[in-house]
Amino acid sequence: MDLLDVGHESGEEAVVVQVKGDVDSSTADHLRDHLTAALDVATTHPKRLVVVDLQAVNFFGSAGLNAVLDCHESGRAVGTVVRLVADHPQVLQPIRVTELDRIFAIYPTVSDALQR
């Protein structure tokens, strides 16, 4: 069984990355690959928006934080906005402890992230 399932798709409002499972040092490269691919798609998307849905993540370690931070910084460098969706402590706690909540735009649902 895979510890992490990641997929991305381009919709009308954004490129959405769905993440499910554990994000740690053994799975972060898989996440990073999808985030990079999503950013590539977003460069030609009219909204230039990537939404990373972390609602189904069970564990979010430092490697995951770094992957999402790299995505955020890469997006910012090319004019693409990256928003996170998280609504539970497994994801929010590491973000808050590292004070990355000062950097990331975090929303409770994908719908909220798309409407801002």
Image: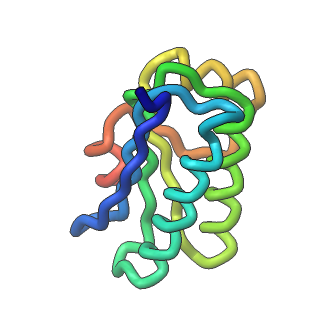
In the image, what residue occupies the spot 56% across and 48% down?
30
Q: Does residue 8 show up?
A: yes
Q: Does residue 100 show up?
A: no
Query: x, y (%) of residue 20?
Result: 40, 33
Query: x, y (%) of residue 85?
Result: 43, 38
Given the current orientation, which residue lies at the most extreme bottom position?
44
User: In screen coordinates, is 73 left or right of 42?
Assistant: right
Total number of numbered discs in the rendering: 0
User: In screen coordinates, is 11 left or right of 100?
Assistant: left
- The way the protein has been coloured in the rendering is rainbow
Query: x, y (%) of residue 4?
Result: 47, 34
Query: x, y (%) of residue 71?
Result: 63, 58
Foreground residue among 96 and 37: 37
User: In screen coordinates, is 15 left or right of 67?
Assistant: left
Foreground residue among 88 and 64: 64
Rendered image quadrant of residue 53: top left
In the image, what residue occupies the spot 43% across and 65% down?
49
